[in-house]
Image (cartoon, rainbow, N blue to C red):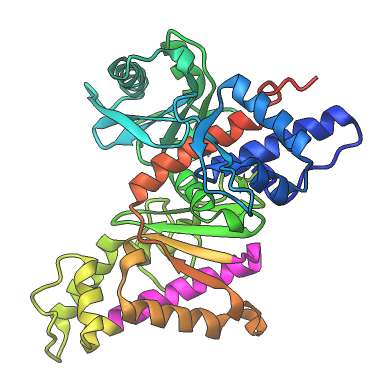
Amino acid sequence: MLENGSAASGSRPENIRYNNCRAVLGLFCHTDRLSVHEITERFNLSKTATMNIINFLLSTGIIYLYGKGEPVGTSGKKPSLYALNPSYKYSVVAGIEGDYIVAELLDFRLNKINFYLHRAYDRSYKAFIEGASIAVKHVLDRAKLTGKDLYAIALYTGGIVDAKSGVLLRPITHSDWDNDLPVVRDLKSALDFDVPVYMDNVCRFGGYFELLKRPDNWNLTILSLFIDENGVGGSLIQNGTIARGKNGLIGEFGHITTNYTMAEKCKCGRYGCFETVVTGSRVVERARKALATAKTPSSAQHSIKRIGDLFAHADNGDAFARSQLDFVAEQFANMLYNMQIMYDPDMVIIQGLYASSGTYFKQNLSQAVNELSLYSIAKGLRLIFDEFDFREAVTIGASFYCREQFINSDSLFDMT
C-alpha cells in the first residue's frame, strides 16, 4: 500500500518527491475527492509541494479537476477539488466459473464496466487458455478499448499457485490437468498485445479485497477464511502484503487437521481435515445421517436441504440443529487456535457460507475461540463475519491488487 499516514522519508530530494507523490496518489485511490488543503494537512506538506504533485498527476491524466468544494474559513473562496480519473486505465479480471471462463472489465476506480462469459468447448487446460484470451478480447471490444488501455490482467483460479512465476503448481479443482502449468506465460502468448498479467488463488484475491474495504487495517495481520459448499480456502495478509510461502501453501487452511477421529476422507487423501468437517455439503450430509438414527424428534426432521436451514433452526432453539453446529463451532475454534499460534493475527475475517450463519452459531463460535485461546491472550482477537458477496470481492480484490502493483511500479513516475 502507498503510505497514507505521512509523507515518506528519503535522503535525496528526488526520492522525497517520488515517495510523496506516491503517497498522495494512494490517498486519491481511497478518497472520492480531495482539496489541496486536505492533502497538505494529511501529509504535512507545504502548499507549493502539494501543488507540484497535483500538477504532475494532472499532467499524467491519473487525476482530474473534479470541481469546486464548499468554502473553508472566512474567505468565502471555494477550493478546487481533484479526484482519481476512472477512465485513466482499465483492468480485466478473468477466472474459471464451472464450464465457463468469465472476464470482467473494471475502470481505474475499480467500478465494473462489463463482463463476458465464454463457454469452453471442453474442460481442458488448452480450452481454458483459449477461452480466457477470447473473453479478455471480447470485454475490450465491447468497451471499444484496446490492450493499450489496460494496466493489467488478473487471473484467479483454485489450486496451489506460484504467483511470482505465474505457474499453477497443483490444479486441485481440475484433476485432469497437469501440474506446474505456466498459465501467465501461455495467456500472454495467446494475446495480441503485451500487458502485465497477475495470477493467484481465488481466495487470496478475495482476502485482499478486505484491505480495500478496511484501509485503516493496512498495517495489521489479517487472516481470511472462506468456506462454501465443497471447499475451504483463505489468505494471510501482513502489512498490506499477501503471504504465500515458498510453495504457495499459505491459504490452504482446509487441509489443517482439526479432528483426528473423523472417518471422512478429504480430497487431499488424508483424514480429519478442517474441510471435511465444515463445508456445507459435509455438514448437511452428517446432519441427515444423525437425524435418521435420532431418538428425539426435531423440528429440523424434514427440512434440512442446506446448511442455512441448520442456522435457522438453531436460531429458533432447535436442540438437534444446535448440537450439529456446536460440533462445527468446536472445529472452527480448533482451527483458529492453530492459526493464532502460527500467525498471531489481529483479526480473522469469515467469508462465504458462515458469514451469514445466524446469531446462535456466531455467538457460539466467538465464545469457543475465547475459551480455547492460549493464556486468554487472543480474547482481543477481532472475529469479523463479512457478508459481502464473495465473488464480487474476488473480482474487485483482484483489480485492486493489480492497481496497487501499477501505482507502485518504478516506471509510473518520472520525478527527475
**Magenta run includes residue 340:** yes
Indicate the position of residue 80 as horizontal and vertical percent values.
57, 37
Outermost residue on the right side: it is: 11
Q: Quadrant of the N terminus?
A: top right
| Direction from residue 336 to residue 137 in the image, left or right | left
Q: Quadrant of residue 222?
A: bottom right
Q: Main secondary structure of the magenta part?
A: helix
Asked if residue 38 is positioned above or below residue 88 in the image, the reply reads below
Outermost residue on the top side: it is: 192
Indicate the position of residue 131 as horizontal and vertical percent values.
31, 21
- Please give the name of the residue rendered at 11% of the width and 89% of the height, measured from the top-left corner: 297
Query: Camera-side residue: 236 or 270?
Result: 236
State the extent of the magenta-drawn residues as a range.
323-346
Outermost residue on the bottom side: it is: 296
| Direction from residue 104 to residue 223 in the image, left or right | right
- Please give the name of the residue rendered at 64% of the width and 63% of the height, measured from the top-left corner: 342
Q: Quadrant of the C terminus?
A: top right
- Please give the name of the residue rendered at 73% of the width and 29% of the height, measured from the top-left corner: 52
Q: Is residue 141 visible?
A: yes
- Please give the name of the residue rendered at 67% of the width and 39% of the height, measured from the top-left corner: 24
